[in-house]
């Protein structure tokens, strides 16, 4: 599902215009990003949680040349689905 498809679904489910739905989707995504930057974690009960994880520096390889390269340490966002989300996904797979 793309962002535009998500906007369309939100528009229909919330019975609002696509312009309003686009603003809502943008606001939610911005709020999640801001929450991660500020607190390092955003919890949406039943849906899941977003958190910032740290990756240590490591040595990798350039796939074209095989040359070793240094990959810097980084903070990366991660998502862990909640039980309700896992159940929803697994229910759809069985059909």
Image (tube, rainbow, N blue to C red):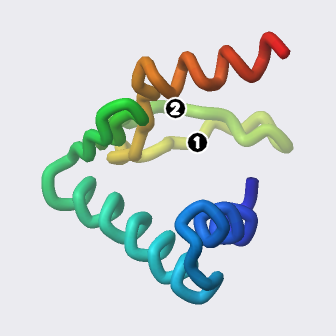
In the rendered view, tell whether residue 95 sits above or below residue 59: above
Quadrant of the rendered image containing residue 27: bottom left
**Residue located at (33% from left, 59% from top):** 32
Question: Residue at the left extreme?
Answer: 39
Mark 1: which secondary structure?
strand
Question: Residue at the front extreme?
Answer: 15
Q: What separation in Å lies between label 1 and label 2 (alpha carbons)?
A: 6 Å
- The residue under label 1 is 69
Quadrant of the rendered image containing residue 87: top right
Res 59 label: 2
**Residue located at (35% from left, 41% from top):** 50
Residue nearer the viewer, 87 or 37 = 87
Residue nearer the viewer, 15 or 84 = 15
Answer few, some or many: residues within 10 Å of disc 1's Cα (few below 14, many 20 plus, some between 14 and 19).
few
- x and y, in percent, of residue 29 in the image: 43, 65
Tally the marks.
2
In the rendered view, tell whether residue 26 sits above or below residue 62: below
Answer few, some or many: residues within 10 Å of disc 2's Cα (few below 14, many 20 plus, some between 14 and 19).
few
Residue nearer the viewer, 82 or 40 = 82
- x and y, in percent, of residue 56 in the image: 35, 33
């Amino acid at each position: 599902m793309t962002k535009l498809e998500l906007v369309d679904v939100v528009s229909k489910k919330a019975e609002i215009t696509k312009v309003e739905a686009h603003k809502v989707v943008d606001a939610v995504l911005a709020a999640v990003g801001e929450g991660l930057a500020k607190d390092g974690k955003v919890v949406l009960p039943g849906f899941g949680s977003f958190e910032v994880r740290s990756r240590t520096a490591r040595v990798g390889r350039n796939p074209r040349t095989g040359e070793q390269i240094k990959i810097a340490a980084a903070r990366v966002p991660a998502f862990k689905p909640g039980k309700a989300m896992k159940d929803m996904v697994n229910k759809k797979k069985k059909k």
